Amino acid sequence: MANLNVHGQENVVAPGFYMPNRLSVQACKTLNYLLQGRLCYITDEAFPLRPDVEQYLKEKRIAIHRFDFRHSTPLAARERVQGLLRAGKSVIFLPGQLAKVRGALTDVPSLFLEYADSMNMPVVPLFLGYYGTTFDTLYRDEPEIDSHEEFYVMPRLEAGARSVSVRLLTAWMEKGMEAFSAQPLLGESLATHLVRSLRKFGHTEMIDGVSGARVPHYKILGVAMTVAKRLRKSGEKRIGVILPPGPGGTICLLACILAGVTPVMINYAASRASFESAVRQAELRLFITARQFMQKLPGFAWPSKEQLILVEDFLKSLPKLSLIGNVLLARFAPASLLCKLHGASERYGEDEAVMLFTAGSTGEPKGVAFTHRMLMSNIAQSCCRLSLDRERVLGSLPLFHSFGLTIGLLLPLIKGRPICTYPNPTEARTLCALIEKHKLTMLCATPTFARAMLRRAEAYTFATVRYFIVGAERLQPELEREYMTRCGVQLLEGYGLSEASPVCSVNLPDEPRVPGSAFAVPSIKPRTIGQLLPGIAVRITDAEDDEKVLPLTERGMIWLKGPNIFRGYVNKPEFNDSVFRDGWFKSGDLGQMDLNGFVTLGGRLSRFSKIGGEMVPHEGVENAIANILKLSSEDEPKISVTGVLDEQKGETLVLLSSVPEHEDPVTQRETLSMIRAELANRGLPNLWTPRHLVFVPSIPTLASGKQDLQRCRDLANEALNTSRSTQ
């Protein structure tokens, strides 16, 4: 029997019209009690009910009114409900069965939310959240979802000019975030859960894609415990880790966490200035790396020898008996003993666990400290949405990339899944070979890396893949179509931010519709970033006025809230004040949500220029110009649009181009003239026309494949200042 906690009894209205996000037998029993038996349910005749719910209502002789919503007017539905209310009965909409969608916010398809609008009636929102016991979410792939339920009766939403449907969705989402955030699991130690999992799934192997070595999880844990003891003696608060994905990087990361030292994952693809800034901000004095890795990056701004711990030498210096003893302990000793011996639970909750730095696409990199709570939250949220019962994961994204850290490493470690690591996500041919050889089922990449893999792939390369998740940049429709046509693989676009630990939303494959049902809540919607993970809420404000809150379905600035959201950038209090409001984080992205919960992005605010009072989207201009110039999206980016200051209009657009013909000044003028004419022919505003064209050898990009926006702006300013000074 489910354990159900009830909240908000003071909000009960009798008689009243109730809209739940879903219902269980226990919730129906609670409603019967709260409404003293004077209630009935209304549902669609083509929306099959959960058998256990239907059986309970029949046993209690509670009326179920079946109504054809699809072929009836909202007025007819309203009259039906009002008639029941006049008879003294509270009316509860009863959602039927849907395809099994893990972690979905609601079982109510958008059609019924639209009806709630058209009926123009007050509505009482009900929220039911399923929460397993502490370990269900992480250690069982199919938890007893009814083992723990939180049931909320929320204040009635009055009918009015503003959409009831959007207010319902908002109420459910924000209550879901609060309920998820209250789970005790999220306050526990990441180190404790890693130890438990590595012990429980000790014989699961991490495959080194370079050497082919297979390292069992218990050995990773045993070596990490030995290293942790030495790191504790360093007295350092934070240690820089300069290592790629692999057993070595995993051991060092885990050792730092066990030692109570914050591993700072260093971006070894960053510039010297960015690296030095990260070192200064994190106050780093000691770094862990490998001699072999140093040889592969001779141009990196390596610290002095005195500041380096070389993994090869460090491991050789460890006492062999101690190392062997810890490996044996990791294999045979109870996890509780291992946790106690190494103080795994000493740091938890809001304590700092890992630090990395944002890529700095728009300026100096900013430090993001991941707390134990943030990482535990995002891992649990991801487990709620992704079925990971048999996944074999490709871990090729760097550990300084938040997605590579959380989803490419920590999530499969805690779920006990095999990981095949490879240190370079750009070596597409090798990655494709590893996918085939090890029958990998879960891939995570940026669209740029995915495009490179497609060029090297055969039709059968991705035959075993269940999830191919892409993010960090916009997924182009042509790439999505070609993957499906050539390889039969559905690319699943998601969205995340380092500040969110990082995953916020993702599209997932649709499940077969329930037999006999005319309704569904989809799991995937093209051109969107998917539905939010459980425990995350969105708020939309006017792009130019943070105080003006908009309905979720209107486009504006996206704000995020949830237990996975960080508390602010390291040592940047003034900047933090500008991106936080009442616990909400300003993402910098524009977008909106539909009634099925899918979020559509409209670009980053930094990728807009305000010209003559109008917001001009850089990506929109780029897409239009790429079409005019007949540039293929399969190639590396050849153009970029950026904005520079303009005394008359505030900003003006500059087109950076690496097209060889555009190096000639005469061709530049002719191209700008042609672009202006073509944009006008297509009905696009004159404001969309770049005033300047600047030739560059290549469009600057970051290690993730995203454009380096700050460098693009710098190149534009440098070129324009140079040309002006020579005039």
Image (tube, rainbow, N blue to C red):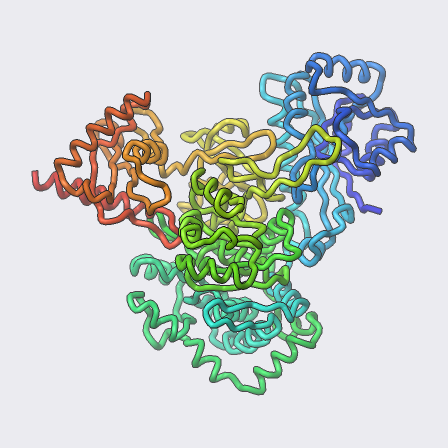
**Picture layout, residue 716 above or below residue 18:** below
Residue shown at the point (19%, 28%) measured from the top left:
673
Q: Position of residue 428 (x, y in %)?
A: 42, 57
Front one among 90 and 657: 657
Residue shown at the point (48%, 68%) measured from the top left:
249
| Horizontal side of residue 95 vs 274, given as left or right | right
Q: Visible in this render: residue 121?
A: yes
| Horizontal side of residue 102 vs 712, given as left or right | right
* Quarter of the view holding residue 66: top right
Q: Position of residue 656 (x, y in %)?
A: 25, 41
* Quarter of the view holding residue 608: top left
Residue shown at the point (67%, 20%) measured from the top left:
115
Front one among 280 and 335: 335
Q: Position of residue 633 (x, y in %)?
A: 36, 41
| Horizontal side of residue 645 vs 303, given as left or right | left
User: Please, which residue is most extreme toward the left here?
Assistant: 727
| Horizontal side of residue 444 vs 614, given as left or right | right
Q: Position of residue 660 (x, y in %)?
A: 20, 44
Residue shown at the point (39%, 57%) measured from the top left:
426
**Picture layout, residue 156 above or below residue 569:** above
What quarter of the picture does the C terminus occupy? top left
Q: Visible in this render: residue 494?
A: no
User: Please, which residue is most extreme toward the front here?
Assistant: 459
**Picture layout, residue 29 above or below residue 412:** above
Front one among 6 and 690: 690
Q: How many numbered tags mark residues here?
A: 0
